[in-house]
Amino acid sequence: MRRLISVASLLALAALALLGGFGEPQFSDAEKKTIASLALNTLPSLKPDTTNQYADVPAAAALGSTLFFDGGMSRDGTVSCSTCHKIDRQFQDDLPQAVGVGHTNRRTMPLAGVARNPWFFWDGRRDSLWAQALTPLENPLEQAGNRAAFAHYIKKRFGERYERIFGPLPDLSSVPANASPLGSDAEKAAWNAMPTGQQDDVNRVFANIGKAIAAFERSIEPEQTRFDRFAIDLATGAKPEGNAAFSPEEILGLKLFIGKANCVTCHNGPRFTDNSFHNTGVPPFDGLPPDRGRVDAVTQVEADPFNCIGKFRDGDESACRELRFMVKDGPQIMRAYKTPSLRGAAYRPPYMHAGQFSTLDEVVAHYSKAPPSVEGVSEVHPLDLSERERAALVAFLKTLSD
Amino acid sequence: MASIWRYILAGLGLAALLVGIVAAVYLTLPQPAPGPDLSRSKKTANGLFVASFEPERGVVRQGELQSWLLTLKTAAGAPVEGAAITVSGGMPQHDHGLPTSPQATDYLGQGRYRIDGVKFTMSGWWQMRFAVSAAAGSDSVVFNIVL
């Protein structure tokens, strides 16, 4: 009788262990590999930016941070980068389209990990972090300033700090108060009347403003989330504890994300982006001017005097391969936009390049239906997800924010 | 005490039977279709050249701009010099092209051409197509790369 009991209890134990095993998340080796490739611990350390020799100079980053939050860096003295890129809101503003001096046509982008991008803006019309920073400064709807005014302002407010980093400021005494090749007619006329050497001097100060701001932005990095803790435990075989454990719904969502729903084809790597441009059939936002995305950005980045092959780049031209080998035409770049990172997305609706969708449910419903694009061809195909599957995807996306 | 061993033996027997059944089921399952031809060296479509395509640094890394080497020999094995090469490609299963426009940037001698600006942004099946024109004529070749 004793023996029978001991054998029975052995069997029961084995059965329990088996059941316990089935209760655990079951992932194939291929799935495990994909999950591991998404975890934040696979993010490589930030590469130096050879096009900006001040990128890792602490004094430059400190000045950049001052400028980022300084309303004085705008025409009316009230708008700074931080008006739209709010430090306590993942460096974005929760609006469908950003509002600066005027109402813009695009959604403010969050900045975590931004220094790792090869391209900037939704359409990638700038090719470096420092060249990007110069654009809102002169955009009439954002900070609405002009480069001559910025040079004077830097000299007056931050002259000493500037010179300690970048060397002596040029003589600005004969530079007009307001002048820029991109400004109002009067500003353009004033710019065109300036001798080339003086234009170069002002451009140099302007580029250095961008380089200081970029040095600051390099410190903005993504943070570890519940998903990362789950992924690390899965990789090491540890049992996820506390909030690192996933609910069955979150596990289903993860499986869909890397499997049947194909999200991981574009949202891949530890930042959940392939850094590339795709038409995903997102409809235009009613009432905004036509927006063709990447196809129009190509000529803009090529024409930008502050691009990588321009004379304001530091280091050599070997850093310019993204620009050199970019896709310049073809149907695939019509209404193509940059794949955004999904880290933190759950806490920052609305979504897409003009805030077209106000919830993650709407986003997932869009992918499930995959309507054709108004122009160009959408790369996503209908998934016909059930309600349960859609909810699971949303539940998984939330694990990238906690 | 001896009889517990009998139980264990019986248990082992059962386990062996189970393994046998699982193996039989596994073996009779349909085998996955053979993937695309992954050879890194092959004849061009009309047999004019023998082409090989290798990453210059030996490894393929997803998401990085890399340079590759395309080596061109005639059918007789002589290096092909002065070839004009155009590059295209994409992901056949996603109907999209390459995320970059790679180009033949340098001739390195012995029929070797550097193809720079190659980037594979996602895992899966990629194709790289080369149209080659040289003294011997024009031909093309497609390489499959699976990440």
Image (tube, helix red, strand yellow):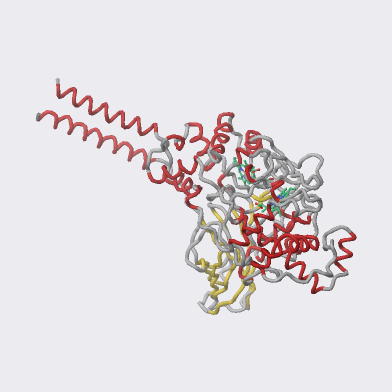
Q: Residue at x 65, y 67 (%)?
A: A164
The part of the image, by quadrant, that contains residue A22 is top left
Q: Is residue B42 visible?
A: no
- On screen, residue A324 versus residue A7, left or right, reads right
How many numbered callouts?
0
Q: Is residue A126 visible?
A: yes
Residue A299 in percent (x, y) is at 76, 61
Look at the image and tell me in which quarter the N terminus of chain A lies. top left
The part of the image, by quadrant, that contains residue B134 is bottom right
Residue A50 in percent (x, y) is at 60, 67
Outermost residue toward the top? A1
The part of the image, by quadrant, that contains residue A107 is top right
Q: Residue at x 9, y 29 (%)?
A: B1
Residue A195 in percent (x, y) is at 84, 73
Q: Residue at x 56, y 52 (%)?
A: B122
- On screen, residue B3 versus residue A345, left or right, reads left
Residue A279 in percent (x, y) is at 68, 48
Outermost residue toward the left? B2
| Above or below, B12 relative to A333 | above
| Above or below, B71 relative to B24 | below
